Image (tube, rainbow, N blue to C red):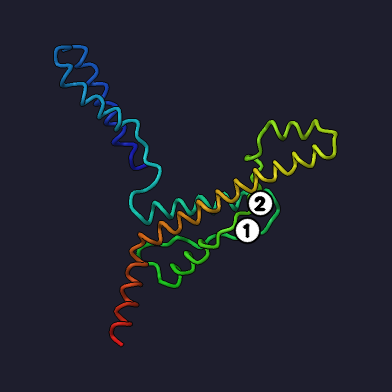
Amino acid sequence: DDAAAPRAIAAVALWAVRLAARAAPFFESWFAPLERWLVRLCTSRRTVPPGFFPCYRAAFAAVNEAERMASVANGEDYRALPDFGTSRSAWDRVAQFYGKAAQFRSCRKFREAEPDEAREALDECFDKKERKRLEKALSNARTAARREYEDSARRLADFCKRRDPRVAARRAAVAAADGAE
């Protein structure tokens, strides 16, 4: 971990600042901001690398990993999104990614979206009509969760596409080619 050494140094500095604050309480106004800054430095953990491409590559890799795990659990075929790529990715790979992401379909079952009380009521239900009503309610909850998840993945891809410098460069190249004709 690249951030471990600075965090360790910050932890030692924080210990020294707290010791100095106890020794000289009349300098509290000086030590308090420094202590807050060191606490943030010690406890902050950057989980996503900085930058457009590493950040969204990690986000779509997480989506792919969740889909892979769900497909293994469900015994279905795994259809991964193509790799998000880097700033130097070829246009055909970029276009392929955004095309597949715009049509994203999840293979997850979304059982976690089912309300617990409806699931428990279904387990205890003996009436056929009541059972059918509860199954429909559970199905609606799963469908709503699936729709929300798929829409959020598509919206993320659309958000990225609007801000992607590779797409902007492609649009500029196409516009320049159209203008040259």
| Residue 179 quadrant | bottom left
| Residue 54 quadrant | bottom left
Q: Quadrant of the N terminus?
A: top left
* Residue 178, placed above or below residue 39: below
In front here: 174 or 166? 174
Disc 2 to disc 1: CB gap under 8 Å: yes
Residue 50 coordinates in the image, percent (x, y): 33, 49
Q: Residue at x 50, y 51 (%)?
A: 152
Residue 146 coordinates in the image, percent (x, y): 60, 49
- Which residue is disc 1 drawn over? 78
The answer to whether residue 82 is left or right of residue 179 is right
Residue 119 coordinates in the image, percent (x, y): 72, 35
Q: Residue furthest bottom?
A: 181
Amino acid type, callout 1: Tyr
Report helix, strand or loop for mark 2: helix
In front here: 57 or 155? 155
- Dot 2 alpha-carbon crowd within 10 angstroms: few under 14, some 14 to 19, many 20 or more: few
- Which residue is disc 2 drawn over? 72
Q: Residue at x 61, y 47 (%)?
A: 144
Q: CA distance from mark 2 to mark 1?
A: 8 Å
